[in-house]
């Protein structure tokens, strides 16, 4: 009797271990696919001319990559609730990050939900993961200063003051990480205040022709 109980317990334990290994394998496979797709997207977006809109074909391919990364998790975000944008940032793939940002802007779409319309793009940029971190927070934490700068510069001016209030600690960390961002961040605050003062809330900011990819000042 004791032997039967032990045998049944051992059999159950083995099945759990096997199933656990399958889960680990699934996780590794998914993450490998996601990393491969994101790396491919990074290569696709390299060499794009600054200030030039993405082609219809490239926009579709970038969006397909985002969708594939989501679908590999059953349509859900990756581990920790990270979106494909966050994963690209975590990997330091600046060209892929730019691709997602530009694709969202050109199609006026929240790539995560597929919703279109006013405010959807900014909603996409500032989504939270399970740790209440945004893509910007992850960029700062990982030390990807250029990616953090890209995200900040692609925020609408009317959004910047609110981001300063909500992300003051992260922004101060960014300043400490690279003193050059001192003037950059406070210039944004001045611009944001001016926009509010002129009653132009929600109006897109002007884009500098000599700025980096899609950078809004």
Image (cartoon, rainbow, N blue to C red):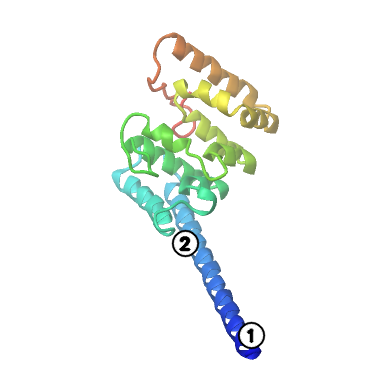
In-image side of 114 versus 17 (left or right): left
Whether residue 29 is visible here, answered yes or no, is: yes
Q: Residue 189 at what x, y percent from top left?
A: 55, 18
Pointer 1 local density, CA inside 10 Å: few below 14, some 14–19, many at least 20: few
Q: How many labels does the image show?
A: 2
Q: Pinpoint residue 211: horizontal percent, then vertical percent.
A: 48, 28
Residue placed under numbered mark 1 in the picture: 6
| Image quadrant occupied by the N terminus | bottom right
Looking at the image, is 108 positioned above or below residue 33?
Answer: above
The crowding category of the residue bearing disc 2, from other C-alpha atoms within 10 Å (few below 14, some 14 to 19, many at least 20), is some
Q: Which of marks 1 and 2 is nearer the N terminus?
A: 1
Secondary element type, mark 2: helix
Residue at 52 percent across and 30 percent down: it is 152
- Could you tell me which residue is drawn at 54 percent across and 45 percent down? 130
Labelled disc at residue 66:
none
To which residue does mark 2 refer?
33
The location of residue 75, given as percent across then percent down, is 39, 54
Of 93 and 12, the residue lying toward us: 12
| Residue 101 quadrant | top left
Residue drawn at (70%, 30%) of the image: 176
């Amino acid at each position: 009797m004791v032997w039967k109980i032990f045998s049944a317990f051992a059999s159950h334990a083995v099945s759990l271990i096997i199933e656990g290994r399958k889960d680990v394998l699934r996780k590794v496979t998914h993450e490998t696919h996601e990393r491969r797709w994101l790396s491919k997207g990074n290569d696709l977006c390299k060499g794009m001319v600054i200030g030039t809109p993405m082609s219809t074909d490239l926009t579709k391919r970038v969006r397909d990559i985002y969708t594939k990364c989501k679908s590999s998790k059953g349509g859900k975000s990756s581990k920790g609730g990270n979106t494909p944008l966050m994963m690209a940032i975590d990997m330091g793939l600046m060209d892929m990050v730019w691709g997602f940002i530009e694709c969202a802007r050109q199609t006026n779409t929240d790539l995560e939900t597929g919703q279109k319309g006013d405010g959807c793009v900014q909603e996409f940029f500032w989504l939270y993961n399970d740790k209440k971190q945004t893509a910007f927070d992850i960029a700062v934490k990982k030390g990807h200063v250029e990616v953090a700068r890209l995200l900040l510069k692609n925020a609408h001016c009317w959004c910047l003051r609110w981001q300063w209030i909500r992300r003051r600690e992260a922004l101060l960390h960014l300043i400490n990480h690279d003193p050059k961002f001192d003037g950059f961040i406070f210039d944004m605050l001045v611009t944001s205040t001016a926009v509010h003062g002129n009653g132009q809330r929600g109006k897109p900011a002007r884009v500098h022709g000599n700025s980096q990819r899609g950078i809004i000042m």
